[in-house]
Amino acid sequence: MLLPEFYVDDVIKKALSEDINYIDLATDLLIDDDDMSAANFVSKAEGVLAGIDCALRTFTFVDSTVKCEIFIHDGEKVKKGDIIARVEGRTRSILKAERTSLNILQHMSGVATATNILVEACVGTKASVVETRKTLPGLRALEKYAVMAGGGRNHRYNLSDAAMLKDNHIDAYGGITEAVSALKKKIGHMAKIEVEVRNKEELREALECNVDVIMLDNMTPEEMAECVKIADGRAVLEASGNINADTIAAVAKTGVDIISVGAITHSVKAFDISLKIAK
């Protein structure tokens, strides 16, 4: 797992604090402290797994004596009925960590699965699928990791990573050339500049400004293909705007370098996984 443990622990701690006030009324009053159990994570759908290390960390965060075993790892495909992992330890600890663990695993695997569907639709082209900053508050790193597990790549992590001049920046400042020129006088030499364009005229202007990346916003595949010819490799071209599983193949075939899709994080369906106590 690429994510640092301290970051994961912070997410888990906040999630557990939401779920358990001071005791688990059902578990603590019903289950003896010395009762032991084993439980299996079982896939109830087909897709790509992400977040199993984070999910299992939830159990050891609650109780360091819980033992975990992984059978299917992040980035691997799972099918219905597969046993993904197994936990063994105090029944109380397993039951207390269950929901938080599944919330993390189901969401991250949902992101990875949604990403992988788009990635596979782009096979045979040079286009890479990336997410956007449309992420759930506090979970951005988990979601970006899940995108990578699904075969995608990452866009900028936050506003400090790169300067993206979108339509509002450009309109507020007075134009592409003016905005880029002013920004280049202030920006650090390590930072890249991306400009959003809405038509071929704006594309040509952005190219004259020698920016690093140009976003083709809400264009048709035909318009994108023309922009690819005009750019002729002078800038990285990113396609964006309402792209989904039905349309992404046509976009990828235009020759763009990057396809950004906010839906793989902001409106992804949770992957169906359950945790079952072994009888």
Image: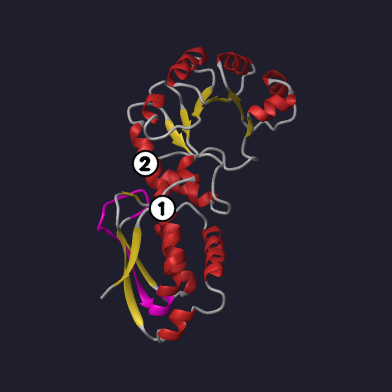
> What's the amino acid at mark 2?
Asn
In terms of secondary structure, where does tag 1 sit?
loop
Q: Position of residue 17 (x, y in %)?
A: 56, 69
Could you say which disc has been placed on residue 270 in the image?
1
Q: Going by the image, does 69 lie left or right of 62?
A: left
Res. 212 image quadrant: top right
Look at the picture and state if 19 lies above or below 180.
below
Could you say which disc has been placed on residue 167 in the image?
none
In terms of secondary structure, where does tag 2 sit?
helix
Dot 2 crowding, Cα within 10 Å, few <14, some 14–19, many 20+: many
Between discs 1 and 2, the one toward the N terminus? 2
Residue 51 in sight from this viewpoint: no
Q: Going by the image, does 210 lie left or right of 261?
A: right
Kindly identify the residue that appears in the image at 26 percent across and 58 percent down. Answer: 82
Residue 15 in sight from this viewpoint: yes
Alpha-carbon span between mark 1 and mark 2: 14 Å
Q: On the image, numbered disc 2 is attached to which residue?
A: 116
Kindly identify the residue that appears in the image at 52 percent across and 15 percent down. Answer: 231
Span of residues in magenta = 73-94
Look at the picture and state if 31 lies above or below 57.
below
> What's the amino acid at mark 1?
Ala
